[in-house]
Amino acid sequence: MTNPLTDWALEADGLVKTFGDNRAVDGVDLRVRTGSVYGVLGPNGAGKTTTINMLATLLRPDAGTGRVFGHDVVRESHVVRQLIGVTGQFASVDETLSATENLLIFSRLLGLTRAGARSKSADLLERFGLTEAAKRPLKNFSGGMRRRLDLAASLLAQPPLIFLDEPTTGLDPRTRGQMWDTIRELVTTGSTVLLTTQYLDEADQLADRIAVIDRGRVVAEGTPDDLKASVGTSSLQLRVRDAADTADALRAIEQTLGVRGVLSPEASRITAPMADPDRIADLLITFREAGIGLAEVSVQKPTLDEVFLTITGHPAEELPVEDLAPTAQTQEVRA
């Protein structure tokens, strides 16, 4: 049912969704190549989940178009639902049943035979470290265990395109690493993954390409290396000794380096893109002449944190405007 002639698993053009006065998604364009991991990076409230919900046929766009393997998400929603899997931010498992019972029910609903359902369920329980707790009611599970089971359930059938909406939120570091390995394995075995995350290291580790979303708009797009290169080959990080000198330090950076420094949430810490580390000497002389004392100074290779700070002016985990879109709790969307 997929179109083998298209290179694109997913295309979005000018997607818009409004809730009251909140324009949650404001003209999003995306291109996700078949057989890749595509990261949509942004803080809570940026519009990531709303975008996913429109592309997964859970919300109707107010404007724009979306296509999955060439099929329109509005006009051909019944076809699209057979091509996708969706794991949302909240567990959709039944807490009155055990982990094994949940997976067996989902498996049977997806058309697996009784033997196939048992085999697949046992494999996933083992993969996510839930074998010992498999017969326990979910009401006795921790939040992290529920999340791991929800992720396992979404992988019972491997559709061509999988939406993972912040899949590692609430997971411990070990389980988070296991989920990263699972995502890589999904692509190796033929799926395309669209991953939303607010974790910069997660996007850097997994994604072939990344769209940075802020306040409902795509503000940057490219490979992780492209995005890092866009803010310079390295970044200057410094902390002034006296917070009262912060404004003067920001002005000195702009005048000497020709770039805008960004004040981090930590008091008096400033980050600025810098293509030429040799210019640090000029800046330090300027600081000394202006009587600005420094507690710390360093030059580092750029990370996605610097990219996000430079592009948006605030860290990835901060956004003052809340996303008012309803949260889809659908774990696997199928016709």
Image (cartoon, rainbow, N blue to C red):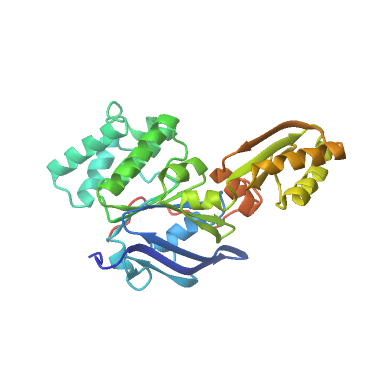
Of 32 and 14, which appears nearest the observer? 32
Query: Residue 171 appears at what percent x and percent y?
Result: 44, 35
Q: Residue 24, located in which quarter of the rendered image?
A: bottom right
Of 253 and 99, which appears nearest the observer? 253
| Point 79% across, 31% down: residue | 241
Count how many numbered circles sit on residues in the image.
0
Q: Left or right of 146: which side holds 240?
A: right
Q: Left or right of 310: which side holds 326?
A: left
The reply to whether residue 156 is visible in this rendering is: yes
Q: In this view, does 70 lie above or below 34?
A: below
| Point 36% across, 50% down: residue | 331
Q: Residue 296, located in which quarter of the rendered image?
A: top right
Q: In this view, does 126 lie above or below 182?
A: above
Of 188 and 84, which appears nearest the observer? 188
Q: Quadrant of the C terminus?
A: bottom left
| Point 83% across, 39% down: residue | 245
Q: Quadrant of the N terminus?
A: bottom left
Query: Residue 117 appears at what percent x and percent y?
Result: 18, 43
Query: Residue 78 appears at what percent x and percent y?
Result: 30, 67
Q: Is residue 287 above or below residue 164?
A: above
Of 136 and 192, which appears nearest the observer? 192
